[in-house]
């Protein structure tokens, strides 16, 4: 028998196997949620507090570089930007 040749019975057994696995995973997820809901929901405030420094680190690139977003930029580059007058300190 050619291994690349699939019969209709093979496809049905794969389909049944996938449905059985999906059902088992759904039941397992349900019981995990019902038994551990208090633990999972109890940690949410701490995750929110932890999200603040993580967002600060990853969104700003760390401390000490807040004003240097454009590395290698000179004052002439700042003066050529639209909407800024030459010599404008802001």
Image: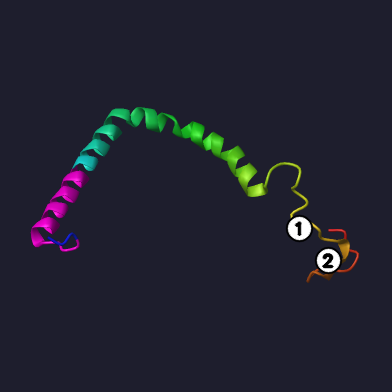
On screen, 50 above or below 74? above
Residue at (20% x, 44% y) in the render: 21
Task: In the rendered structure, find residue 70 and report the number of the disc placed on it.
Answer: 1
| Disc with the residue nearer the chain's start (1 vs 2) | 1
In the displayed structure, 29 sits above or below 19; it is: above
- Tell whether position 68 is magenta: no
Does 2 appear above or below 20? below
Instruction: Measure how far apart labels 1 and 2 are at the Cα level.
Output: 10 Å
Range drawn in magenta: 4-23
Instruction: For mark 2, give the secondary structure.
Output: helix
Q: Which mark is residue 77?
A: 2
Instruction: Give percent across and percent down for residue 51.
Output: 55, 39
Question: Do the numbered discs 1 and 2 sit on residues whose CB atoms are within 8 Å?
Answer: yes
| Residue 29 at x, y percent in the picture | 27, 38
In the rendered view of the protein, which quadrant contains the N terminus?
bottom left
Pick out the residue farthest to the left: 9
Q: Which color scheme is applied? A: rainbow
Left or right: 10, with 54 as reference point: left
Q: Specify the principal SS of the magenta part.
A: helix
């Amino acid at each position: 028998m050619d291994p690349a040749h699939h019969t209709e019975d093979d496809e049905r057994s794969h389909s049944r196997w996938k449905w059985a696995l999906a059902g088992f995973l759904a039941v397992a997820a349900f019981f995990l949620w019902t038994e551990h809901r208090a633990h999972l929901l109890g940690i949410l405030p701490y995750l929110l507090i932890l999200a603040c420094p993580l967002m600060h680190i990853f969104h700003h690139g760390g401390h000490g570089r807040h004003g240097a977003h454009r590395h290698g930029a000179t004052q002439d580059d700042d003066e050529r930007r639209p909407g800024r007058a030459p010599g404008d300190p802001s």
